[in-house]
Image (tube, helix red, strand yellow):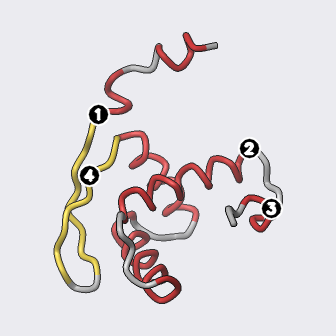
Amino acid sequence: MCHFFANQHPESYAFETRSIRLNGQSTSIRLEKMFWRILEEIAGQQGMSVPRFISTLHGEVLNLWGEVANFTSHLRCICVAALETRADPAEPEKRQVA
């Protein structure tokens, strides 16, 4: 089993930095390429570009929770949640952490 995970090509977890505008300000987001691919898929499902999706998401998170201490970690968690939903489309409430 570990062979599958250990056998991942290093390119899949190499970092990629992209410039994006959040709330009118330019910033950079650095994520592993695998997470960018998942975000591209999610954004496409929402009918948005990745920058627009991330900007929209950031605004919604600010409205719900206020400033996010580590937005890139939040993006990674969103990717994992999307993969969980794909694997088991149970209601989101069942997967939320209290």
Q: Quadrant of residue 91?
A: bottom right
**Disc number for residue 87:** 2
Residue drawn at x 38%, y 30% as measured from the top left: 12
Distance between the alpha carbons at the discs numbered 4 and 3:
30 Å
* Relative vertical location of residue 12 with respect to residue 25 in this rendering, above or below: above
Tag 4, which secondary structure?
Answer: strand
The single residue placed furthest to the left in the displayed view is 26
**Residue that label 4 marks:** 30
**Between disc 1 and disc 2, whose residue precedes?**
1
Type of amino acid under label 2:
Ala
**Between disc 1 and disc 3, whose residue precedes?**
1
Residue 58 picture location, percent across and down: 40, 76
**Between disc 2 and disc 3, whose residue precedes?**
2
* Direction from residue 88 to residue 76 in the image, left or right: left
Distance between the alpha carbons at the discs numbered 4 and 1:
10 Å
Disc 4: CA contacts within 10 A as few (<14), some (14-19) or many (>=20): few
Tag 3, which secondary structure?
Answer: helix
* Relative vertical location of residue 68 with respect to residue 4 in this rendering, above or below: below
**Residue that label 3 marks:** 94
